[in-house]
Image (spheres, coloured by chain):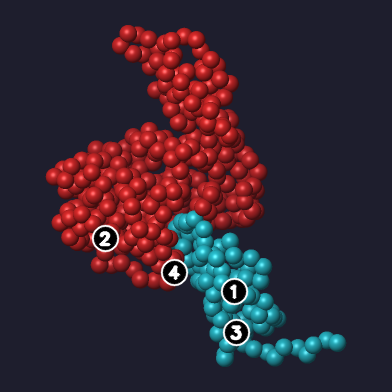
Chain colours: A red, B cyan
């Protein structure tokens, strides 16, 4: 059971406890306090062991700061809510705060990764960026969210998958460093969509079958014919609107889009690896963040080239699945079949040869 | 001494915005003839077409492709969203505004 974030004064108190029953908590508190500056937050868990002793455990916690750009295009803006503070009542600020918390929780609790850099990097976000600003982005250091124009898009903090997507760009920046252009750029985008979807599923405790697999659900106003911006399950079907046109994502490598726009169509061609992930997750069933998500997460730490193409990344996911679950495992089979389902094949993928 | 007025040149300008989280492409167009009260040559020449714009940092930022054709001159540039400032911003805002007026006027 998670009871929230431990403030520094309580950590200090726990660190000074003389009771042997709290030895582990004391050690954890001392460790947390030594990590300064800046002070790292921690997560406190209470439970009872077999002998009915109260056990307190400390785990990593997020260190969030949400700033308000007050409709200017100037970063970072004015601090609106810091770690541990009560809700402000401003939906954008509070959604960003909660969304970063949910994203931190997935990476910390499921993959044992402490924040974006694995070392407790503070999570900084800015809301109310620009006037009628139709975007959310990661600028290399912080997550930035616009309010939307009110006609096509509402505020970009309105979807947890968007917040997870942006934070995941930070994780990719600190791990695989995939170059943001062409196929490696589409992979970078896809990794953010995958973990954006998984944050939402983990937060709502949804299985593969229960999940929407949509990115940006609820961002569109009621004027738009569409449920979301992208679908991992069925790329190309998220929206179909008179004004916006149709979701242009391909679901198969045969339909890869060559374009000069958008760094070579990174938000379009991401549909291909997105569906490969969905197919692998669907084959494995249960909670997608557990096995399929673990394999994709492990892949980020393999020595990938920054310019890796789909085939190289696919081979790395097979390698990651083999390393964790064994070469003959159903996980490897599901991953290979996932890539085959979107037309990404090759000796290093389905032949299971070492790359 | 006042300089003689610049020779009137006709321009056709296209602004394409791509990328962003949504990955939706948008395009705006304007011609000199749409509004001859605007100093199009001045707007175009104020932009540093030959300067290399740094790539966008991070991810999901808008990418702007701007092209201005005024025979025999042809200028194109690709900019990241943070680089869309000063004369670039002025040119883009003008094209967007004229484009919007054109679409609002029937015929």
Q: Position of residue A293 (x, y in %)?
A: 30, 43
Q: Nearer the viewer, residue A170 or A189?
A: A170
Front position among marks 4 and 2: 2
Q: CA distance from mark 4 to mark 2?
A: 23 Å
Chain where mark 2 sits: A
The label on residue A313 is none
On-image quarter of the C terminus of chain A: bottom left
Above or below A236: residue B101: below
Q: Quadrant location of the N terminus of chain A?
A: top left
Query: Looking at the picture, do discs 2 and 1 lie on one chain?
Result: no
Residue shown at the point (50%, 23%) measured from the top left: A30
Can you identify the residue that label 2 sits on? Answer: A311
Can residue A213 be seen here? The reply is: no
**Residue A207's quadrant in the figure?**
top left
**Which one is in front in this view, the residue at disc 3 or the one at disc 2?**
2
Vertical comparison of A72 with A117: above or below: below
Along the viewing direction, whichever of A304 and A139 lies nearer the viewer: A304
Residue B51's disc is 1
Disc 3: which chain? Answer: B
CA gap, disc 3 and disc 4: 23 Å
Q: Secondary structure at mark 3?
A: loop
Q: Which residue is mark 4?
A: A261
Residue A211 shown left or right of residue A150 in the figure = left
Mark identifier at residue B11:
3
Q: Give the distance between the C-alpha atoms of the residues marked 1 and 4, in whole angstroms.
A: 20 Å
- Identify the residue at horizontal 35%, vertical 47% (top origin): A301
Q: Are marks 1 and 3 on the same chain?
A: yes
Report crowding for label 1: few under 14, some 14 to 19, many 20 or more residues within 10 A (C-alpha): few
User: What is the tally of numbered marks visible in this picture?
Assistant: 4
């Amino acid at each position: 059971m998670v009871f929230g974030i431990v403030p520094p004064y309580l950590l200090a108190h726990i660190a000074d406890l003389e009771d042997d029953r709290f030895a582990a908590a004391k050690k954890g508190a001392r460790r947390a306090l030594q990590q300064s500056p800046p002070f790292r937050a921690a997560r406190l868990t209470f439970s009872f062991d077999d002998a009915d002793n109260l056990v307190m455990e400390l785990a990593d916690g997020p260190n969030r700061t949400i700033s308000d750009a007050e409709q200017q295009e100037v970063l970072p803006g004015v601090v609106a809510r810091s770690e541990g503070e009560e809700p402000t009542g401003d939906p954008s600020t509070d959604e960003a705060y909660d969304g970063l918390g949910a994203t931190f929780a997935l990476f910390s609790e499921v993959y044992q990764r402490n924040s974006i850099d694995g070392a407790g990097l503070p999570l900084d976000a800015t809301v109310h960026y620009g006037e009628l600003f139709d975007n959310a982005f990661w600028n290399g250091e912080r997550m930035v969210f616009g309010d939307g124009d009110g006609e096509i898009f509402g505020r970009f903090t309105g979807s947890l998958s968007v917040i997870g997507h942006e934070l995941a760009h930070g994780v990719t920046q600190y791990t695989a460093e995939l170059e943001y252009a062409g196929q490696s750029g589409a992979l970078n985008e896809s990794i953010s969509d995958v973990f954006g979807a998984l944050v939402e599923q983990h937060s709502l405790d949804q299985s593969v079958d229960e999940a929407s697999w949509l990115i940006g659900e609820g961002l569109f106003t009621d004027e738009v014919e569409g449920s979301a911006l992208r679908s991992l399950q069925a790329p190309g079907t998220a929206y179909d609107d008179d004004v916006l046109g149709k979701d242009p994502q391909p679901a198969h490598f045969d339909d890869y889009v060559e374009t000069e726009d958008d760094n070579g169509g990174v938000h379009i061609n991401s549909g291909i690896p997105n569906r490969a992930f969905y197919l692998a997750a669907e084959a494995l069933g249960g909670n997608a963040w557990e096995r399929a998500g673990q394999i994709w997460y492990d892949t980020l730490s393999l020595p990938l080239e920054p310019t890796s193409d789909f085939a190289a990344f696919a081979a790395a996911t097979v390698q990651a699945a083999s390393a964790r679950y064994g070469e003959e495992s159903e996980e490897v089979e599901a991953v290979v079949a996932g890539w085959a389902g979107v037309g990404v094949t090759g000796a290093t993928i389905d032949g299971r040869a070492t790359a | 001494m006042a300089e003689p007025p610049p020779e009137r040149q006709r321009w056709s300008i296209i602004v394409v915005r791509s990328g962003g989280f949504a990955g939706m492409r948008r395009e705006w167009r304007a011609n000199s003839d749409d509004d001859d009260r605007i100093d199009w040559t001045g707007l175009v020449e104020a932009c540093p077409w030959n300067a290399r714009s740094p790539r966008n940092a991070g991810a999901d930022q808008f990418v702007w492709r701007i092209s201005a054709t005024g025979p025999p001159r042809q200028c194109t540039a690709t900019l990241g969203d943070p680089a869309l400032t000063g004369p670039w911003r002025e040119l883009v805002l003008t094209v967007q505004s004229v484009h919007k007026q054109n679409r609002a006027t029937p015929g």
